[in-house]
Amino acid sequence: MRPVIQVSAVRKTYGSTLAVDEVSFEVNEGEIFGLIGPNGAGKTTTMECIEGLRTPDRGTISVLGLDPFNDVYKLQERIGVQLQQAQLQKRIKVWEAVDLWASLYHKDAIDGERLLEQLGLIDKRNAWFMTLSGGQKQRLFIALALINDPEVVFLDELTTGLDPQARRAIWDLVRGIRERGKTVFLTTHLMEEAERLCDRVAIIEHGRIIDIDTPQSLVNRHCPERTVVLATNDLTAVERFRTIPQVEAITCTDSQFTIRGRGDDLVTEVIHCLSENRIRVTDFRTILPNLEDVFLKLTGHPIRD
Amino acid sequence: MLRGLWKLTWIEIKIFLREPLGAFGTIGIPVLVFVVTGRIVGHSLAPASLAASSFIGAGLPVLASVLIAISAVLSLVTIISIYREGGILKRLRATPLRPQTILTAHVIVKLLLTTATLALMVLAGKRYYPVGIHAPLLGFTMALLISTCSILSIGFLIASIVPTARFAQPIGAVIMYPMIAVSGLFVPIGSLPPPLQSVARVVPLTYTVSLLEGIWRGDAWSEHVGDVSALVVVFIVCMALSAKVFRWE
């Protein structure tokens, strides 16, 4: 896999505020790469530097072998962009926007009508922008980002403000973009979105990248804890659980046991112990750490602050 | 550079017409001012009165034309600031569209609007205006377009510095309308108190009024080289300044 985006030691300040500090990472061809972090962490600034909309104070950026600052028009021919909280003219019709965008690129645009159909907007082609719902607006922005058949697609906080159903529909669309062989670079402050959608994520806070990897590897690396919660009336059970090597702590309230330990094997070992000793359980569930826990561990505070 | 210009211009015209109130305000009001005031003045003053005939003969048509240009400019200022606040300018800029193309499209829309309103005014005038219209219309249209370009450049400067869309219209109006008072339309520049005379000399509207009145009366363009040059200078200075301070977001 060759990198299509290379960011090296980028720094950007607004007045005395340091927005992005020594940020470096690479995005590979064909992957969905997510820049995740709380609001104000520097996600949008980083993305807009890569898109050529802002100039970094320091550092180098290369996208598809181009310098976003000096080759901005060449670059814009080959990338698709969706901006955070963008609007269009209130009374522009859906088809007019698609038609205008299609006319802006030198290479042949893809069929706008088909694109609207694929994005479920064909019924709305004559509707004014201002009459669209939040989800429809975002789908239109995706259409505009795809109209020039770009090699890299940038999506900034794509599902913010959407209800869960619309959000899931958008996720499917983004996966569809990857299946067409395109690279997707997205930002989100929703850990669930990153976990479900991204092949790799970079966690950013206060303008610095804290760690980069696949969501699963990040969880394994930073949060190896596993928790099993089960309910049983068997009073001898607690002694049996203590013999499992991975177990670190057991708490018990009434008939409910919470078993904490680390490593992927914990759950298997607990199940094994239950069946070997024929312990009857009335409830059994596991609590696995996720990116949200990784963020809490790395920064000391939850992402929802 | 021209890629997307005509399509964007055409879409902006359609969008403008889809907002009936805004379209009526910018097109209708100058025409109404022209016809209604003309009839009131024409009826109430003795036809032989020198002031009345001078006002109806050139003053009022020029006032109405200046109103056309100013309302075009105010509408430009408002649109630019709404587009900036809504992120529309930024979204357009994240395409191969050149910034100049986006702004040029808006200027073309406003110039077309100015021409259309002027045409409407002349048509209404032929039917309802007390003394009829006997001006060199082609030359006058040219003069109005040059003036509008010049005032539009001031509009861009205002659009560059207004903080939010809500203030765009009032700030634009506060800057634009007082210029009419010292522009020589109502009181000849020579009769103004000296401090105001110096103000009048730097107000671009003064040259607009002088040019429009002259062409309306049938002057040759060669008599107004000074006015045209002043308007061109205003255009260049304001465009250069706005290029420096213009904010896309």
Image (cartoon, coloured by chain):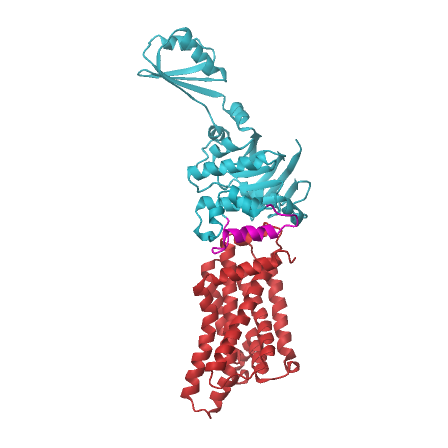
Chain colours: A cyan, B red
| Residue depicted at 60% across the width and 62% down the height | B104
Does residue A108 belong to the magenta stretch? yes
Name the side, left or right, on which B177 lies relative to A253: right
Q: Residue furthest left?
A: A254
| Residue depicted at 49% across the width and 69% down the height | B71
Q: Tell me, yes or no, if residue B131 can be seen here.
A: yes
Question: Viewer-proximal residue, A65 or A69?
Answer: A65
The image position of residue A241, as x and y in percent, is: 41, 11
The image position of residue A190, as x and y in percent, is: 47, 36
Q: From which residue to which does the magenta span run?
A: A86-110
Give the quarter of the figure containing the N terminus of chain B.
Answer: bottom right
Name the side, left or right, on which A148 lies relative to B29: right
| Residue depicted at 58% across the width and 72% down the height | B145
| Residue depicted at 47% across the width and 15% down the height | A266
The image position of residue B115, as x and y in percent, is: 55, 71
Does residue B56 belong to the magenta stretch? no
